[in-house]
Amino acid sequence: MRFSFFARGQYLCTALLTANGNLNNFLLALVLCLDFMERNVCKLMNKIASFTVDHTKIVPGIYLSRVDGDVTTYDLRTRKPNTGDVMENAVMHSVEHLFATFVRNSEIGNDVIYFGPMGCQTGFYLLVRDAEHERILAVIKKILSDIIAYDGEMPGASEIECGNYRNLSISAAQKECRVYLEQVKEWTAEKLQYPN
């Protein structure tokens, strides 16, 4: 962790003031200050945006997570958080392969930055450049429908293409997408804000 010049200066001044002119006291105080700084690093860091959302109020849906310049992050929440109902790894992995392939080959493909699962196993993030909400919602719903109807091979299902290629199932992804589409089929841009 790199600390700002100001933060390091504050700790150096604290160590100097504590030392009372004694080199050994200064070194001991400096070590203690640096140790304190390392232990309290999380208190010095800004909280990331997704940790400021009240997860007790989130239900399955599509939400506007954040906007950074021309990049919009959408929260495709498939599960209510903290209920014990999470996606199994094979389900997340399979939806990721299919949805990422379909979205990068869709009408917004050139604007897609990223699609991938949340570590909490309750949804996915879709990052898109120059997003128009209604258009993105329509594309998401179309892709879910296309995955449900898909009868081809799993994209990226080889040892060369994927780090865990045996952990993929088209039927598991289709089942997940079928349930999720039912939850978001009437979702509109007016519902993109997180519940409060």
Image: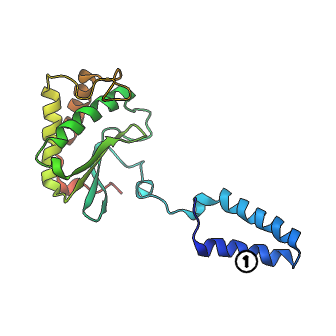
Name the quarter where the N terminus is drawn: bottom right
Compared with 125, 180 (above or below) is above
Residue 104 percent location from the top left of the image: 19, 42
Residue 88 appears in the rendering: no
Q: Nearer the viewer, residue 90 or 52?
A: 90
- Residue visible at 23% across and 53% down in the picture: 128
Q: Is 195 positioned to the left or the right of 138 in the image?
A: right
- For label 1, the crowd category at 10 Å Cα-Cα, with few meaning under 14, some 14 to 19 and many 20 or more, is few
State the SS at label 1: helix
Residue 160 percent location from the top left of the image: 32, 27
Q: Is 96 positioned to the left or the right of 109 in the image?
A: right
Residue 58 percent location from the top left of the image: 36, 47
Q: Is 85 positioned to the left or the right of 4 in the image?
A: left
Q: Tag 1: residue type?
A: Cys
Q: Quadrant of residue 72?
A: bottom left
Q: Quadrant of residue 166?
A: top left
Q: How is the image coloured?
A: rainbow
Residue extending farthest left: 107
Total residue callouts: 1
Q: Quadrant of residue 193?
A: bottom left
Q: Nearer the viewer, residue 99 or 82?
A: 99
- Residue visible at 62% across and 72% down in the picture: 7
Residue 77 percent location from the top left of the image: 31, 43
Residue on which the image places disc 1: 13
Name the quarter where the C terminus is drawn: bottom left
